[in-house]
Amino acid sequence: MSRTYLSPPDVGRVERDLLIEAFDSNWIAPLGPHVDAFEREFADAVGVPCAVALSSGTAALHLALLILGIGRGDDVVTSTMTFAATANAIAYVGANPVFIDVSPDTWTLDPDLLEEELKRRARRGHQAAAVLTVDLYGQCADYARVGEICERYGVRLVEDAAEALGATYGDRKAGAFGECAAFSFNGNKIITTSGGGMLVSRRRDIADRARHLAAQAREPAPHYQHAEVGYNYRLSNLLAAVGRGQLKSLPDKLARRRAINDEYRRALRDLPGIAFMPEAAYGRSNCWLTCLTVAPEAFGASREDIRLRLEREDIESRPLWKPMHLQPAFAGCAMSGGSISEDLFQRGLCLPSGSSLTPGEQANVIAALAATSAARGQSARGVAHA
Ligand SMILES: Cc1ncc(COP(=O)(O)O)c(C=O)c1O
């Protein structure tokens, strides 16, 4: 039996054909017709006017902050519950991350704590330069509230939508909030180009500037002319071809991830001590990863017991993100609250959720998880069989 991964790439014939077409065209460069087409198609999919294809989601975050003029000495408020790339991008521009805990209702940036933070800063006359929200595990942050708070205090909003392609908030898609948003096409994401990212924005000037900086800030001249420091951040035409193929099946991939999430919820609903990531009423998650928390007393085993049991069965699962305020790399950064994210980290687990996960593989995950409960006699009845 082969290993069951958390979220492996799900690629097929369409991607292969496009990749070979790109190869045969000899546009083997960080520019070309597939890059242009991928940008147009991606912008349409997200519902924003502009998209710039880049080498990673991290590059998109870095450029977003640079272009908004955020730099040394500035403070950027962000969610502590995220992948390190969010905070790293803040550090790249020389700014200071200011971490905020998440709301227990959405696991995204807590709007009440954000409001307190910006109010305190307004009183001190030292306002944050930006708020960088994270659409965690494919669930949008609370944009009505966060957007209103940012507007009230005159703070710019940037969206880390790396995990959230296809998620919605009201009738808008993840990536449509804030002045810029970043997406990732890393191998474990909902669509992948092996590595890659996209910066999207409503503003054409931001997109043009991102394209310029991502191409080593090369000026239009026959020789190599550079008026400022640039970056080598453009996406390869070969990878853009793969991305175009992936985008074509995005609706199927979203439906599949949703069905996997539904099945976990259905099959595990009666297990004591298991609670799933709440889905906020304001939108629809893309179900990138199905996440749950374990109350050890009720369940009869800990999150780590489950993870190790799955591992013994060659099933990959992973603790939720370790909060940034607990990471040595960000020791000493300001932090507001923390108990919610710390608890999620202690008790939370991401289950295999890839769009290529087969019903048989998922049944094995469910069976192994249920078998971990010490209250087996009682809880086994709780595992709803199809
Ligand atoms: C929340 C978040 N932000 C940023 C990134 C960075 O994206 P990339 O790996 O494409 O640089 C990721 C994923 O990798 C992520 O999960």
Image (cartoon, helix red, strand yellow):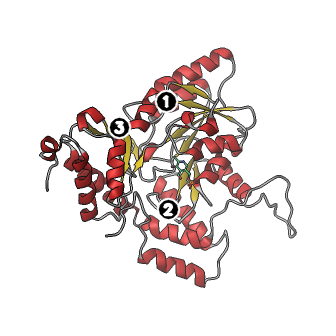
Q: Is residue 267 above or below residue 130?
A: below
Q: Amino acid at mark 3?
A: Ala
Task: Give the mark nearest the N terminus, 1 or 2.
Answer: 1
Q: Amino acid at mark 1?
A: Asp
The kind of secondary structure element at disc 2 is: loop
Determine which residue is flagged by label 2.
Answer: 187
Mark 3 vs mark 2: give the one in front: 2
Q: Which mark is residue 101?
A: 1
Determine which residue is flagged by label 3.
Answer: 280
- Give the residue displayed 41% in from the left and 49% down from the top: 318
Within 10 Å of the Cα at label 3, are there few (<14), some (14-19), or many (20+) other Cα atoms? Answer: some
Q: Are marks 3 and 1 in contact (CB under 8 Å)?
A: no
The kind of secondary structure element at disc 1 is: loop
- From this viewpoint, is residue 63 visible? yes
Within 10 Å of the Cα at label 1, are there few (<14), some (14-19), or many (20+) other Cα atoms? Answer: many
Where residue 296 appears, as percent x and y from the top left, is: 29, 35
Q: Answer left or right for 294 relative to 60.
A: left
- Give the residue displayed 36% in from the left and 50% down from the top: 308
Which residue, as the protein is rendered here, is positioned at the far bottom?
24
